[in-house]
Amino acid sequence: MHYPENMNELREIISSARERGACLVPLSSAAPHIHGGSSNERAETVSFEKMKKIMAINRHDRYVRVEAGVSFAELLPQVKAAGLRLNMPFLPRSGKSVVASALEREGVLLPKYQFDYTDPLLNAGIIYGGGEEMRTGSAAGPIPMEESRADMVSPWGPGTVDYMRFLMGAQGTMGLVGWATLKAEIAPSVSRLFFVEADELEILTSLASELLFRRIPDDCIILNNVSLAAAFTDGGEEESAAAAAAASWTLICRICGYERYGEERLNIYEGYLRDCCREFGARCKNVPGGGETFAEKIDSMLGECDSRETYWKMRRGAVEEILFLAPPSKAAAITKLGIEALKAQSEKDLGIIIQPQVQGRAFRVEFELMHSGDEAVAERVWEAEKSLFAAGAFFDRPYGKLSEFVFSKDSNEVDIMRKMKKLFDPDDILNPGKLCF
């Protein structure tokens, strides 16, 4: 196990491993590790737990810069104190690395402010497998960072290559990221939370697309009754009661007002929201099926991390996830196909999260199969993933066996990626075997 404390030490670890012929796998988040991307029997582990520096929080330019070991629990209070908020995943575990989350392209809660699939990641400091250090985007250059007058927030370059896109989803196979700059947003002065319910998923996916086209909601996420109850309760009878009281599908939608004319903005947006709900036949409520106390709990937890002793997805002991993107016109149909493929799974253990992304141009769908260690679940997931792939689901975050399956469908892309791997990691020492190399 290696514990670098800065970029120089990280470079030395990689150079030493290359000389010794050893392989390395990065680890930046606390347990549990669900997907297996940070474990490799063939490699020594590089833990970023000592790279905990919050390098910058800038409200004027709306960004944060952090080292790879900084978790959501460590960053969120300081971001909030600065009058900002992160465009972050839905209830990430408290020990999850902020940088790793962005590199993995996890779904974000504020699709209105996501202009590209790389958002909120802006630029980063990387050590490649050959031992070379690079700063991407406007952070690039030969001079030390502290002497640079650049804003270090533009993600493109250096040159004509988009290195951020090259690194995302690579699971540490191309280079190890020591720090990153991420986009942040101004925190609202006032906000209102609404719960839009429907019995058919297609109603809410169509509604979410329309609402984002009009740029109405900030927080925007669709949950089935299982995920809604599991995420916002502490389990047991409370979870069962919340699941029974909730609608089949709930769109959680927050509208926000800021320093100027905040209440006026909220009133106008609420009018638009209710008009759209009537048009699509959805039920717009201030309180979900679980009651007013449940609504208050959701309001307080949304936009925070999960600091409970047991991560909500792991409450039954284990979880298998299916993660993919779908176009707005097909999101509901592909999700229904996935439900049918997993019909052997108990309905009370099948959570589904659907997040519009990039201003509604796609939906990120997550199936959460929560179980107590049943080995047959993994096989059901594998069969469902193949069915979903055939139906048009786009797996941009493939892990394990699925990774080999997805990449096998495009030999030309694989050839190019292997050439790039040879350039940036010539001795194949970084997390070997995780993708198509």
Image: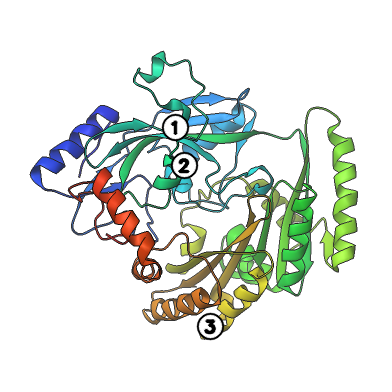
User: What residue is shown at x 31% (from left), y 49% (from top)?
Assistant: 420
Which quarter of the picture shows residue 128?
top left
The amino acid sitting under disc 2 is: Val
Q: Which residue is mark 2?
A: 98
- Quarter holding residue 60: top right
- Circle 3: residue type: Ala
Horizontal relation, residue 298 to residue 168: left or right: right
Query: Which disc number belongs to residue 418?
Result: none
Say whether residue 289 is visible.
no
Given contact means CB atoms under 8 Å apart, are the residues at marks 2 and 1 in contact? Answer: yes
Q: Quadrant of the N terminus?
A: top left
User: Residue at the spot x=86%, y=59% of the render?
Assistant: 276
Quadrant housing residue 263: top right
**Residue at the disc numbered 1:** 66
Identify residue for label 3.
Answer: 341
Identify the residue at image location x=44%, y=81%. 383
**Does residue 238 appear to the left or right of 306 in the view shown?**
right
